[in-house]
């Protein structure tokens, strides 16, 4: 039986969703195989802000008027000031940043940030803040809202390539964990409009060869939100067939794991929201530390008479 690894190169074909690849892969002539994403290549052309983004200040909703793919602290403050002034010319609310690049809102009157879209939360440093928030300090007779964190201007520091055939990865939330099937982790050390060439060294998953007929990849940020790409994404995939003898051994070792995954559904990626299931801490602990039950060994024909003599 041929067990030589097979290499594939696939790319996104939907210009509206360059971060997604839905495809089928020719399967080896075995029941199981190992799948590894050996590299991901694209350009760092992310839509960081689009027309769906907004911020609500003192009950007034300010909407982003155009798409942006390259933003920094100074340009964000300048743009927010422009849309606030354009929509409410008589307001004295202004946006600044301090020596640590933290953004703050200043006014002579009380300020409340009622709500904010996800992308603006990333850039303003409000990801871990529960909205609404009020002015929390004073500066030169002005009441200010100081955003506690420095904003993230090229998505999150870690990106994930999620896949319906991937390995479970867990992210902590306030009182629970959220699971997602992951096949690659990307450390976000690139720059806007520059190439991304990321080799994989973390994840290899064992799957049924029949499941290769429906494979779905989605590039997401560390909070399991889809990123919006303006350039096609290319994946290099290696498929390694598992020989029959090793296949049987794999079935015995991973029997409990397979049964658990079948019980908790197969967690396919959904088209509109790519979120995984949520588990509490006790469920995660039971899942991780579950041990395979010991099998009772039956004595061989030569061992049985010896045991009877000893008795």
Image (spheres, rainbow, N blue to C red):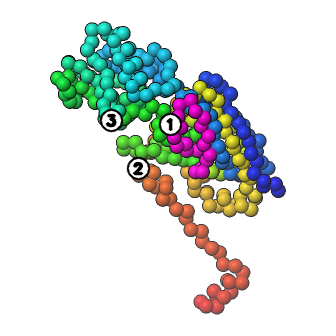
Q: Quadrant of residue 118?
A: top left
Marks 3 and 1 sit apart, C-alpha to C-alpha, by 24 Å
Residue 31 drawn at (x, y percent): 74, 51
**Span of residues in magenta:** 182-203
Q: Is residue 35 in view?
A: yes
Secondary element under disc 2, as helix, strand or loop, is helix
Q: Earlier in the sequence, mark 3 or mark 2?
A: 3
7 sits left or right of 130 in the view: right
Please identify the residue farthest to the bottom as the structure is shown: 309
Residue 240 drawn at (x, y percent): 72, 52
Count residues near mark 2 (Cα–Cα under 10 Å), then give few for <14, some for 14-19, many for 20+: few
Q: Quadrant of residue 2?
A: bottom right
Q: Are marks 1 and 2 in contact (CB under 8 Å)?
A: no
Secondary element under disc 3, as helix, strand or loop, is loop
Mark 3 highlights which residue?
100
The structure residue drawn at horizontal position 38% and vertical position 20%, both measured from the top left corner, is: 78
Mark 2 highlights which residue?
281
């Amino acid at each position: 039986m041929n067990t030589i690894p097979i290499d594939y190169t696939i790319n996104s074909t939907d210009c509206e969703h360059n971060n997604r690849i839905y495809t089928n892969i020719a399967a080896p002539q075995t029941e199981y195989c190992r799948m590894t994403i050996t590299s991901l290549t694209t350009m760092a052309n992310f839509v960081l802000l689009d027309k769906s983004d907004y911020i609500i200040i003192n009950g007034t909703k300010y909407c982003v008027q155009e798409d942006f793919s390259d933003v920094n602290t100074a340009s964000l403050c300048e743009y927010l000031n422009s849309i606030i002034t354009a929509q409410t010319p008589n307001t004295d609310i202004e946006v600044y940043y301090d020596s640590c690049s933290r953004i703050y809102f200043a006014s002579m009157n009380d300020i409340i940030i009622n709500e904010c879209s996800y992308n603006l939360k990333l850039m303003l440093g409000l990801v871990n803040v529960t909205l609404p928030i009020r002015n929390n300090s004073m500066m030169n007779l002005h009441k200010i809202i100081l955003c506690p964190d420095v904003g993230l201007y090229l998505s999150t520091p870690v990106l994930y390539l999620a896949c319906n055939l991937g390995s479970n990865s867990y992210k902590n939330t306030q009182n629970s964990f959220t699971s997602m099937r992951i096949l690659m982790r990307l450390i976000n050390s690139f720059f806007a409009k520059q190439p991304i060439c990321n080799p994989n060294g973390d994840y290899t998953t064992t799957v049924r060869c029949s499941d290769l007929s429906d494979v779905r990849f989605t590039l997401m940020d560390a909070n399991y939100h889809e990123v919006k790409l303006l350039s096609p994404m290319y994946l290099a995939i290696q498929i390694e067939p598992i020989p029959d003898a090793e296949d049987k051994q794999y079935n015995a070792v991973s029997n409990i794991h397979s049964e658990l995954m079948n019980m908790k559904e197969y967690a396919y990626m959904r088209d509109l929201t790519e979120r995984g299931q949520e588990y509490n801490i006790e469920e995660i602990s039971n899942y991780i530390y579950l041990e395979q039950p010991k099998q009772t060994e039956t004595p061989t024909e030569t061992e049985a008479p010896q045991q009877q003599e000893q008795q």
